[in-house]
Image (cartoon, rainbow, N blue to C red):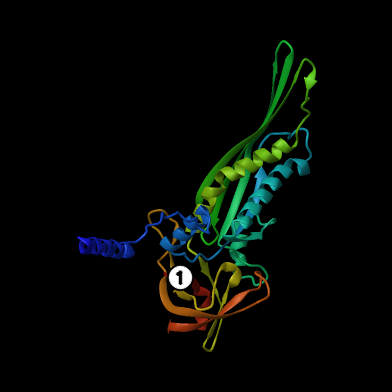
Amino acid sequence: MRSKTVLVSVLTVAFAGCATVSSETKPAESLLSRQMQISAQKKQAIPERKQYKRKIAIARFTNETNYGRALLTDKEFNRIGKQASDMLSSRLVSSGKFLVFERPDIEKIEREQQLLQDSKMIGVDTLIVGSVTEFGRSVKAKIGFLSQTKLQTAEAKVEVRLVDVRTGRVFFSGAGAGEATTEAGTVAGYGSRAAYDATLNDQAIGAAISDMIGELVFRLEKRPWRTYVLAIENEQIFISGGTHQGLKVGDLLNVMMSGKTVRSKQTGLELPLPSKQIAQLRLVSFFGDSELEEGSVCEIVSGELDSALINKYYVSEAQ
């Protein structure tokens, strides 16, 4: 009996020594915020797409409304159009997607087409033509037994057109509308009295620009990117555009030859035949000190180029 008791005791101790003690697992907080985790997942899921910056210019932005026409001078009257132009230009530059150039004196598309052959100014791909088509202010007052409320409202509407400088064709037309309000009131003679608020004009125009800027950027980004061959010297090909447009050493670019232009018997319009690829380039270095003067040096990967046909060439991004 004593031996059985000793055996049971030994087995109990043995099993106790083999037993594992489970501890409760506590969740650990990530060192990264949830927003940073989501951003990292998106970058892994969606590969970054190379995006070259398009060259655009605002040709004109006019005030076509009747607001203040009889009371304001021509300079004051046109200030609304200039203000809209400045706001649009600022938003396009802030997007970081475009190279925006000033064209304050250009009135005709033909002048922009001539700039493509002028070394003193950079030709752009798209001209933006716009106007403030509606603008107005209203004041509404509500008077109660002991209260008075004054509501000031400014409303504006802007319209823009995007013009292909090579063909003169309008490929997009859009509009945006916005309003701004301010309210002040008094009760039993106490409260604030609303004087004329000139900033409402600015806010309404800004809201109208913001209303259509998203669609405008989308349409501009859909346009094919292109640049031009500046010179051909031995094995080196010099093209316009550089780092400010998003180009990088090692990028592959296609050299295209424009198709000849023929007249359509159906519409009477001049139509360009499809372009064809004749060479491919690899970017090897850059030159120039600013975005107005920058260019790229390329080498030929495949195909041949003839310096006598340089005006018929243009460069596009390789797909």
Tell me the residue at 63%/44% (across/down): 131
Q: Is 67 placed above or below 283 here?
A: above
**Front residue of 318 and 265:** 318
Count of numbered marks: 1
Q: Quadrant of the C terminus?
A: bottom left
Tell me the residue at 54%/50% (across/down): 216
Amino acid bearing label 1: Ser
**Front residue of 170 and 22:** 22
Most distant residue in the bottom direction: 234
Q: Position of residue 68 (x, y in %)?
A: 73, 34
- Can residue 311 be spotted in the picture? yes
Q: Position of residue 121 (x, y in %)?
A: 66, 68
Horizontally, residue 226 falls left or right of residue 110, namely left
**What residue is shown with label 1?**
258
Q: Position of residue 192 (x, y in %)?
A: 78, 25
Horizontally, residue 17 falls left or right of residue 248, namely left
Check disc 1 and report its element: helix, strand or loop.
loop
Location of residue 27 by image quarter: bottom left
Tell me the residue at 77%/41% (across/down): 76
Horizontally, residue 49 falls left or right of residue 17, namely right
**Front residue of 158 and 274:** 158
Tell me the residue at 21%/64% (across/down): 3
Q: Position of residue 46 (x, y in %)?
A: 43, 61
